């Protein structure tokens, strides 16, 4: 969840901003490409669950 080369540290993503996360994953943001055509809604839900859980490995 932490990319030392400059990507956003997902451990710090606000847990109350699920809609913002989903929008960024599906439509892209800054240098992150959109994944909406490749990920199913349940895949995005699983990613959100991972972020909220705070896993670091």
Image (spheres, grey):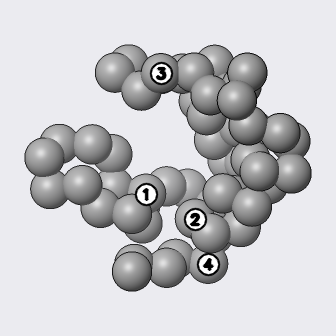
Local crowd size for mark 3, using a 10 Å CA cut-off: few (<14), some (14–19), many (≥20): few
Left or right? Give the position of 5 relative to 11.
left
Tell me the residue at 33%/45% (across/down). Answer: 8
- Picture layout, residue 8 above or below residue 34: below
Task: Identify which residue is drawn at 47% across, 21% down.
Answer: 33
> Which residue was labeled with disc 2?
51
Q: Residue furthest left?
A: 5
Find the distance from the CA under tag 3 to the CA under tag 4. Answer: 24 Å
Q: How far apart are marks 2 and 4 (CA)?
A: 5 Å
Looking at the image, residue 38 lies above or below residue 22: above
Say the numbered circle drawn on residue 26: none
What residue is pinned by disc 4?
Answer: 53
For residue 4, say whether it is visible: yes
Residues at circles 1 and 2 in contact by the CB criterion of under 8 Å: yes
Closest to the camera, between mark 3 and mark 4, is 3
- Give the left or right position of residue 35, taking residue 10 as reference: right
Residue pointed to by mark 3: 33
Q: Is mark 2 on a helix, strand or loop?
A: helix
Q: Looking at the image, is mark 3 or mark 1 nearer the viewer?
A: 3
> Residue visible at 55% across and 56% down?
14
Label pair 3/1, CB-CB below 8 angstroms: no
Looking at the image, which is closer to me, 29 or 42?
42
């Amino acid at each position: 969840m932490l990319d030392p080369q400059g990507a956003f540290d997902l451990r710090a993503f606000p847990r109350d901003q699920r809609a913002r996360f989903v929008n960024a994953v599906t439509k892209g943001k800054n240098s992150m490409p959109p994944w909406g055509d490749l990920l199913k809604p349940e895949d995005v839900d699983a990613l959100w669950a991972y972020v909220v859980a705070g896993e670091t490995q």
